[in-house]
């Protein structure tokens, strides 16, 4: 006797059978910004139903949104996408709001929506803010953008939309009573003052655009994925088949266009569309979210690639993404989902112009070749998290947004040599190198020696670039601090590698930091003259990023000392080359690291020398005092008389961590770029990073000149 299958009304499994699995489709899209590539974070997964739970597995139990039951786990699948552009909508009914016409990211940050620098300064007036004393600064949480609707149908604010509470309050002051035709329709005409006052009522269709529903905006999902594989520079075809602006694209394993319609079901689904360009399954196709009378084209399909670069045509509109999970075996459409994005913002603002402070007499004749050098901690993506920087908008922390700002800032500085720290390994080739190579630079990269954080390439390192028209590479080396630690413990300290003392010392010293060392030669060398018989045409550049933990000043001092010893041997064997040491030293001017660099040695009684952490003494008495032979000067101190007020500016720390050091015997600074004042920084956010400043560090720039050899 054959057992009958249980039939469950309303079940979405074939034939109404009870499913043993639940399928779930996660889809998320970041905030769209002009020129910044959008890549869907799409992930499909299943959960096996535990049959031991009995009635709790009733097929009639309500499933979460975008889920369904099935008799089997999902087969191998791939995703196909369709992108849509929506109509223009009014975003705020208060006529005094600049966001009615401006889509500058600065105006749309939570910081700006909550009142900007004036509100922030008022809140900070009562707070004692002293990072040097170890006190945390107050973190201001901005209001989220919301829609406010007046409940009174007789108010001129009825069904009006406001981008934030401040605009609502301003509009409330000028509201007036209106009479409406009593037909019960929300969009009835006003009898008095239809569109007068400091605000305007927007149409019901536009209002529904801002209404909240399950997929109205992009929502993050656990387990979503957008793993890059390789880099291309595709062209995106717009409405008129024009090539949209290009951006470095990390393509995925997903297809760039829908699969051929070999499967009847799939072909039918992708072909069904209405006049606005939506397929029949798109929930926004018939939701009234477009207004054909207010927009000539309404909703239109704009791309079927797995990625999309918003253009000028998209600014001020919302986008919608439709994703379909398709079986690679037979082309069956397994699941589908659609999400809307936030309004598309204009491209990231241009970098702020920096004034240059010049040394007196720098324009006088004499001396050798001149070059400009810059150093910048670019803030790797793996560290740019909301937990670390809660005051910065999530979309402004995204690598796509920050990458464009960082590159424009670097190109605006027009340096001949660029030293970068916190360059993520998977971003070096696909983003940084590609962009700077196109701008005329060549470079080398060295990642930290630790393992990546999760996926391959999720580890940062140092990158050093030079302008091809100015220099060519003569020598290039990398320095691994872990390797120097092994040599120091075994040879200098003479410890048994298997002893507890050696292991404790190595555990404290091995922090995976690295340094770069290059020798660059001028493409057009200076020729001998009567005043300069032996011109110097080469320069040695060192780039490093020391350990960041505040409780390890002795390790940072040791790393600095070892780097200087390596440089001494290297430079001396090549005829005392001009030397510059740039980077993030993670040390303030009151530390032993600064003393070591500026004074040639550290006093044996310095607190950083005499630390006894982990029962390890890194500097035994017979090695003291530690010193070096270079005559180094700080570029900013030489030009301005002091270090900047800050090179790192966050909510919990404000101070100097980055430096540019030079050999005073054969180099001299000509000028430096001014560092943004605190007033400039808090104009765009509580601290850095922000919509204007894409790193928590400041780009430092200097013009240098090679000195003539003494006769």
Image: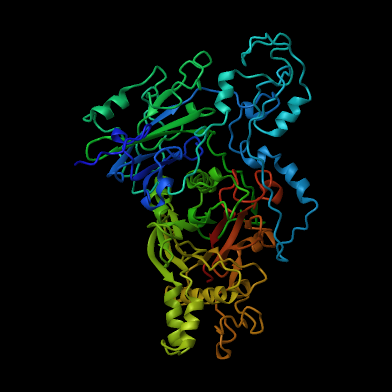
| Quadrant in which residue 154 is drawn | top right
Residue at image location 54% in from the left, 56% down from the top = 376
Indicate left or right for 159 with 473 as reference: right
Quarter occupied by the N terminus: top left
Kindly tell me whether residue 468 is visible in this rendering: no
Between residue 260 and residue 414, name the one nearer to us.
260
Left or right, 265 with respect to 343, comes to left
Residue 628, percent from left and from top: 55, 79
Extreme left residue here?
Answer: 1
- Name the residue: 52% across, 66% down: 581
Where residue 41 sits: x, y (%)?
42, 43
Identify the image quadrant of residue 555.
bottom right
The percent position of residue 199, horizontal first and vertical second, equals 70, 21
Say how many tags the image has.
Answer: 0
Left or right: where 155 falls relative to 545: right
* Residue situated in front as seen by the camera: 283 or 38: 283
Residue 26 on image: x %, y % = 42, 42
Question: Where 137 sits versus 282, above or below?
Answer: below
Q: Tell me where residue 474 sits by quadrant.
A: bottom left
The residue at the far front in this view is 1
Q: Is residue 308 visible?
A: yes
Looking at the image, which residue is at 62% across and 16% down?
186
| Point 54% across, 83% down: residue | 618
């Amino acid at each position: 006797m054959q057992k009958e299958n249980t039939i469950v009304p309303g079940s979405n499994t074939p034939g109404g059978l009870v499913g043993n699995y639940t399928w779930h489709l996660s889809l998320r899209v970041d905030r769209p910004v002009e020129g910044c590539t959008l890549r869907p974070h799409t992930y499909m997964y299943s959960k096996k139903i535990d049959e031991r739970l009995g009635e709790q597995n009733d097929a009639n139990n309500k499933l979460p949104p975008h889920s369904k039951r099935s008799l089997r786990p999902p087969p191998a699948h791939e995703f196909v996408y369709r992108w849509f552009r929506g109509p223009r909508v009014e975003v705020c009914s208060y006529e005094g709001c600049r966001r009615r016409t401006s889509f500058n990211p600065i105006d749309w940050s939570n910081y700006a929506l909550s009142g900007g620098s004036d509100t922030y300064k008022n809140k900070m007036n009562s707070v004692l803010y002293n990072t040097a004393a170890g006190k945390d600064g107050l973190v201001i949480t901005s209001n989220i953008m919301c829609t406010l609707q007046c409940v009174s149908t007789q108010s001129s604010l009825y069904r009006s939309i406001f981008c934030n509470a401040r605009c609502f309050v301003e509009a409330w002051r000028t509201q007036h009573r209106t009479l409406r035709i009593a037909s019960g329709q929300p969009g009835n005409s006003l009898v008095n003052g239809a569109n007068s006052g400091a605000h305007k009522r927007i149409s019901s269709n536009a209002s529904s655009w801002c209404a909240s529903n399950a997929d109205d905006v992009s929502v993050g999902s656990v387990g979503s994925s957008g793993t890059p594989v390789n880099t291309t520079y595709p062209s995106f075809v717009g409405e008129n088949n024009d090539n949209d602006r290009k951006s470095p694209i990390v393509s995925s394993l997903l297809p760039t266009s829908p699969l051929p319609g070999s499967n009847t079901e799939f072909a039918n689904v992708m072909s069904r569309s209405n006049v606005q360009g939506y397929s029949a399954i798109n929930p926004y196709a018939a939701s009234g979210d477009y207004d054909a009378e207010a927009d000539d084209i309404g909703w239109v399909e704009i791309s079927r690639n797995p990625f999309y670069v918003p253009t000028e045509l998209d600014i001020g509109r919302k986008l919608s993404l439709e994703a379909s999970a398709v079986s690679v075996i037979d082309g069956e459409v397994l699941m589908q989902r659609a999400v809307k994005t936030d309004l598309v913002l204009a491209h990231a603002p241009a970098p702020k112009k920096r004034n240059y402070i010049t040394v007196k007499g720098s324009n006088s004749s004499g001396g050798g070749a001149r070059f400009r050098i810059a150093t910048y901690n670019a803030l790797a993506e793996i560290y740019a998290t909301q937990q670390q920087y809660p005051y910065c908008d999530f979309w402004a922390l995204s690598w796509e947004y920050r990458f464009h700002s960082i590159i424009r800032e670097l190109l605006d500085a027009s340096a001949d040599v660029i030293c970068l720290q916190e360059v993520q390994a998977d971003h070096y080739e696909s983003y940084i190198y590609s962009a700077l190579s196109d701008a005329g630079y060549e470079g080398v990269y060295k990642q930290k020696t630790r393992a990546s954080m999760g996926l391959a390439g999720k580890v940062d390192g140092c990158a050093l670039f030079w302008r091809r028209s100015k220099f060519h590479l003569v020598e290039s080396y990398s320095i691994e601090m872990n390797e120097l630690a092994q040599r120091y413990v075994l040879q200098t300290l003479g410890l048994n590698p298997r002893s507890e003392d050696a292991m404790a010392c190595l555990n404290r010293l091995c922090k995976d930091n690295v340094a770069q060392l290059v020798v660059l030669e001028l493409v057009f060398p200076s020729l001998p003259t009567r005043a300069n018989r032996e011109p110097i045409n080469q320069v040695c550049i060192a780039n490093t990023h020391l350990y960041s933990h505040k409780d390890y000043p002795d390790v940072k001092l040791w790393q600095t000392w070892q780097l200087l010893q390596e440089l001494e041997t290297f430079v001396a064997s090549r005829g005392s080359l001009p030397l510059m040491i740039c980077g993030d030293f993670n040390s303030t001017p009151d530390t032993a690291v600064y003393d070591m660099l500026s004074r040639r040695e550290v006093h044996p009684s310095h607190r950083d020398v005499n630390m006894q952490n982990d029962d390890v003494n890194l500097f035994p008495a017979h090695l003291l005092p530690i010193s070096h032979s270079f005559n180094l000067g700080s570029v900013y101190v030489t030009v301005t008389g002091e270090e900047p007020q800050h090179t790192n500016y966050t909510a919990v720390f404000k101070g100097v961590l980055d430096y540019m050091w030079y050999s005073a015997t054969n180099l001299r600074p000509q000028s430096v770029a001014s560092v943004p004042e605190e007033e400039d920084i808090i104009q765009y956010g509580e601290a850095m990073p922000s919509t204007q400043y894409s790193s928590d560090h400041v780009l430092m720039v200097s013009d240098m000149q090679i000195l003539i050899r003494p006769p």
